[in-house]
Image (spheres, helix red, strand yellow):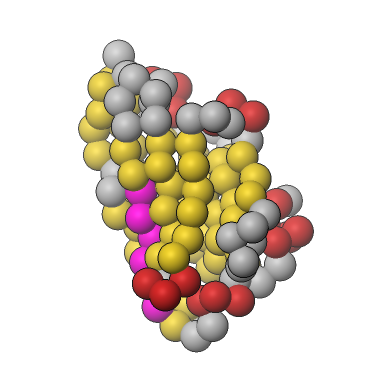
């Protein structure tokens, strides 16, 4: 059993930055690929970024590439999402996800989900 708790969301002006954190508890955190999803009202959940257990392989959805950075610290059981140059259309609830298979995570399958943290980008 893995529990995921997100933090770091909030209100930011367009062009600003936020860093989201996801603290994991449970067994074998370092064996999980981790990801960040987001979902806005009336829209489908979208994979924003993913990172393999080693931290070597990373994925970003095209719309955030160059602005967002995913990283992990296995010693702290924590994954981060640094978000720069935020846009109003990126207002959403952001969810942390943990899945043993990186390839499954890439197609939206995840064994564990956090409760989400709200990110609001004002214009």
Q: Residue at 59% of width from left, 60% of height from top?
A: 55
Residue at the farthest right position: 103
Mark count = 0
Q: Position of residue 66 (x, y in %)?
A: 54, 29
Frontmost residue, 64 versus 11 = 64
Residue at the farthest front position: 56
Vertical relation: 24 (above or below) 79: below
Q: Position of residue 58 (x, y in %)?
A: 63, 50
> Is residue 34 at all visible to an observer of this figure?
yes
Q: Residue at 39% of width from left, 24% of height from top?
A: 85
> Is residue 4 at all visible to an observer of this figure?
no
The image quadrant where one finds the C terminus is top left
Q: Position of residue 4 (x, y in %)?
A: 41, 67
Q: Is residue 14 left or right of residue 61?
A: left
Q: Residue at 28% of width from left, 48% of height from top?
A: 8
Q: Position of residue 19 (x, y in %)?
A: 34, 44
Q: Is residue 47 left or right of residue 14?
A: right
Q: Quadrant of residue 14?
A: top left
Vertical relation: 59 (above or below) 12: below
Q: Residue at 39% of width from left, 26% of height from top?
A: 86
**Magenta stretch contains residue 77:** no
Frontmost residue, 49 versus 117 = 49
Q: Quadrant of residue 33?
A: bottom right
Q: Main secondary structure of the magenta part?
A: strand
Range of residues picked out in magenta = 20-25
């Amino acid at each position: 059993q893995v529990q995921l708790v997100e933090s770091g969301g909030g209100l930011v002006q367009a062009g600003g930055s936020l860093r989201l954190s996801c603290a994991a508890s449970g067994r074998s955190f370092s064996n999980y690929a981790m990801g960040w999803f987001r979902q806005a009202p009336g829209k489908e959940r979208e994979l924003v970024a993913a990172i393999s257990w080693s931290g070597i392989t990373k994925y970003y959805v095209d719309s955030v590439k160059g602005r967002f950075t995913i990283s992990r610290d296995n010693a702290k059981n924590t994954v981060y999402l640094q978000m720069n140059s935020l846009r109003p259309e990126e207002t959403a609830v952001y969810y942390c996800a943990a899945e043993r298979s990186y390839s499954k995570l890439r197609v939206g399958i995840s064994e564990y989900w956090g409760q989400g943290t709200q990110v609001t980008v004002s214009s």
